[in-house]
Image (tube, rainbow, N blue to C red):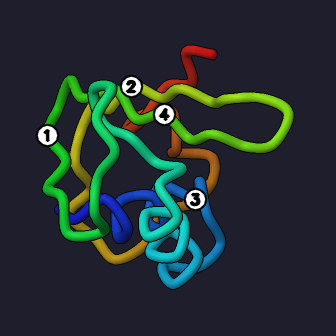
Amino acid sequence: MRIDKFLNVVNITKRRAISEDMCKNGVISVNNQVVKASKEVKVGDEISIKFIEYTSIYKVLDIPTSKSIPKAMQEKYVVKIQ
């Protein structure tokens, strides 16, 4: 699954377009490499999102098969490390 779609499906970003813009601006990295929106996410990847004052790091546990998941099920697919 693409990184922009993954971030949207697991409720880290509100819209896929926001995830896509974040990738274009270089604030999203996977395994310490800045990525494009088309980067495929795999189980075990670490996703870093750099905000102005802090950085959030998530570990991918599973890839969702549906277009959206409830917020309550987010911890099944991704865990926040930092």
Crowd tier of the residue under label 3, counting other residues whose Cα lies within 10 Å: few below 14, some 14–19, many 20 or above: some
Q: Which residue lies furthest to the top in this view?
A: 81
Crowd tier of the residue under label 4, counting other residues whose Cα lies within 10 Å: few below 14, some 14–19, many 20 or above: many
Crowd tier of the residue under label 2, counting other residues whose Cα lies within 10 Å: few below 14, some 14–19, many 20 or above: many
Mark-to-mark CA distance, 1 and 2: 10 Å
Q: Are marks 1 and 2 in contact (CB under 8 Å)?
A: no
Work out which quarter of the rendered image holds the N terminus and state it: bottom left
Mark-to-mark CA distance, 3 and 4: 15 Å
Q: Do the residues labelled 2 and 3 touch (CB within 8 Å)?
A: no
What SS does tag 4 mark?
strand
The residue pinned by badge 1 equals 42
Residue 40 location (% of width, % of height): 14, 55
The residue pinned by badge 4 equals 48
Is residue 33 rendered to the left or right of residue 23?
left
What SS does tag 1 mark?
loop
Mark-to-mark CA distance, 2 and 4: 9 Å
Q: Which of marks 3 and 4 is nearer the N terminus?
A: 3
Residue at position x 28%, y 63% in the image: 36
Label 3 or label 1, whichever lies nearer to me, is: 1
Residue 16 location (% of width, % of height): 48, 79
The residue pinned by badge 3 equals 11
Q: Are marks 2 and 4 in contact (CB under 8 Å)?
A: no
Mark-to-mark CA distance, 2 and 3: 14 Å
> Callout 2, which amino acid?
Lys
Q: Earlier in the sequence, mark 1 or mark 2?
A: 1
Mark-to-mark CA distance, 3 and 1: 17 Å
What SS does tag 3 mark?
loop
Label 2 or label 4, whichever lies nearer to me, is: 4
| Residue in front for this viewpoint, 5 or 67 | 5
The residue pinned by badge 2 equals 59
> Callout 4, which amino acid?
Ser
